[in-house]
Amino acid sequence: MPPFVETILVVFALIAIGFGAAGVRLIKSATGDGLSDFVFTIAVPLLLFRTIATASFDHGAPWALWVTYFAAVLVTWTTAHLTIRSGFGRDARSGVVAGVTAAFSNLVLLGIPFISGLYGEAGLVVLAQLVTIHLPIMMGASIILYQWALRRDGAVGKAESVSGLVTGFLRQLFSNPLIIGILGGSLMRFTGFAIPGPVDRVIASLAGVAGPVALFAMGVSLYGYGIRGQVRQALSLVTLKLFLMPAVALGMALAIGLPEFQAKIAVAAASLPAGVNSWLIASRLGTGQRLASTSMTIGTALAALTTGIWLAIADALL
């Protein structure tokens, strides 16, 4: 059995346990929300802070990694937008939600424990290079494109001014705990200060539970979101997310000669399903919540199989 199969089984088993615990009412939905809050506001930000502040970045500037991954994002987002608009007759605002849902990999709740389980701390360091710009780019793109979509759909009265748009985006960005953790780690690295021993042990203790708690909390959350209809549309987006996006990432990695280790992580990250951020963005935009919820639930279930397929393909070709 390939080594990655065991990691996949463990990762998705933890998600399934959380889902099952919520399903039989062992865990209240409020408890799941509390676990998710802990993961997003404390455990994962501390993990990113410590990783960026202390890890050795041996792969050089991540430009090629970013080009590989975000080329896949661009192709998948555009295809999803056109699919929902042309194939299902939805408006431009729904097209933006479709693009987010098909191209926004769950790099935090699922990606961090998955990549660290597969490739250890070295893999987490490479993933951190993606996470540092992933959330700002995806949030910024979704907000800007949604304002464009409002005007395209004729809902000009709902569109914000440019200054309000920028101010709101920056306020959301710099109040996000993940961004705070990234910036804090970058500052520590830039200044050269070492984390004091006792402080580092406390941070490491909290960061160390980020992976399993994140996966369990994700399972609880998935039960709450569930399948909310629009299955045909959701399946089209899931197909793009789980097949087109990793295929483009793999093709780009081969085309530009991305080093093997980075290329495998880029493909693995691109193969992950959408996470709760796609639903949160849909909720903020006020449309497409059912589409995002159904896509997230179905995609996570299918990814237990498709991610393994892409890892096997990457091992064979890279």
Image: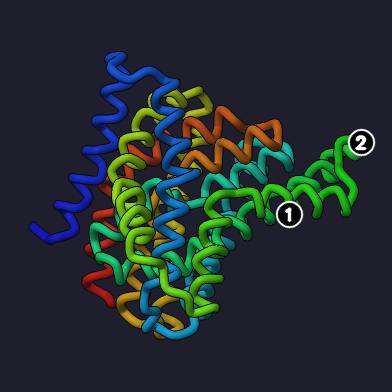
Q: CA distance from mark 2 to mark 1?
A: 22 Å
Return the residue nearer the eye: 17 or 174: 174
Q: Is residue 148 visible?
A: no
How many neighbours does mark 2 have within 10 angstroms: few (below 14), some (14-19), or many (20 or more)? few
What residue is shown with label 2?
A: 157
- Counting residues from the N terminus, which is met first, the one under dot 2 or under dot 1? 2
Question: Looking at the rendering, in which quadrant would you find the C terminus?
Answer: bottom left
Q: Is residue 124 visible?
A: yes
Q: Is residue 14 left or right of residue 210?
A: left
Identity, as a three-letter code, of the amino acid under mark 2: Gly
What residue sits 41% from the left and 67% below the top? 195
What residue sits 70% from the left and 37% below the top? 285
Please state the horizontal and vertical placement of residue 167, each as a whole percent of the image.
81, 52
Q: Which mark is residue 315?
A: none
Please state the horizontal and vertical placement of residue 268, each as a whole percent of the image.
34, 61
Place residue 246 in its image quadrant: bottom left
Placement of 28 over or under 149, stated as above or below: above
